[in-house]
Amino acid sequence: MPTPDDKARENIDRLLTQAGWTVRNQSDANILAYRGVAIRDFALKQGHGFADYLFYVDGRAAGVIDAKKEGVTLTGVDTQSETQQKSIFDPQSLAEGGELPPKSR
């Protein structure tokens, strides 16, 4: 049975796809294959956890989103997003062909 987080992720994935983003897992993402790629559950630098979504446009890191439950205010989220942005696991160091480095958990 899907958890509330699973349901939220499915909804976010659907909305991003409708908006023109290609949504992928980190393990199968190729940021050069599409103009806009949203990578879900992106591993940050050691000790910094995961970003719910990392966005790439034209092969370059463009933004980070940390999903919140409906009704949660955005107070303090800007600080969390900024920390995550600084903790991205080498978003520009890619294997040949635009593939991301393997995710380590």
Image: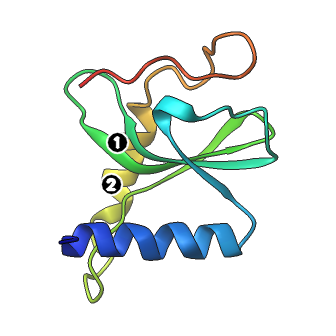
Q: Position of residue 9 (x, y in %)?
A: 38, 67
Mark 2 nearby-residue class (10 Å; few <14, some 14–19, many ≥20): few
Is 103 situated above or below 51? Answer: above
Q: Position of residue 53 (x, y in %)?
A: 46, 52
Residue farthest along the front direction in this orientation = 1
The residue under the point 31% across, 52% down is: 80
Residue 80 versus residue 18: which sits nearer the camera? 18
Q: Position of residue 95 (x, y in %)?
A: 64, 11
With 96 as the anchor, is 66 left or right in this view?
Answer: left
Is 93 situated above or below 70? Answer: above
The label on residue 35 is: none
Q: Is the Cβ of the residue at disc 2 closer than 8 Å to that at disc 1?
A: yes
The residue under the point 21% across, 75% down is: 4
Label 1 sits on a secondary structure element that is: helix
- Of the residues shown, which amino acid type is indicated by label 1? Thr
Which quadrant: the N terminus? bottom left
The label on residue 79 is: 2
The residue under the point 75% across, 17% down is: 97
- Of the residues shown, which amino acid type is indicated by label 2? Thr
The label on residue 83 is: 1
Which quadrant: the C terminus? top left
Q: How is the image coloured?
A: rainbow
Q: Which quadrant would residue 89 be assigned to in this image?
A: top left
Is 101 situated above or below 40? Answer: above
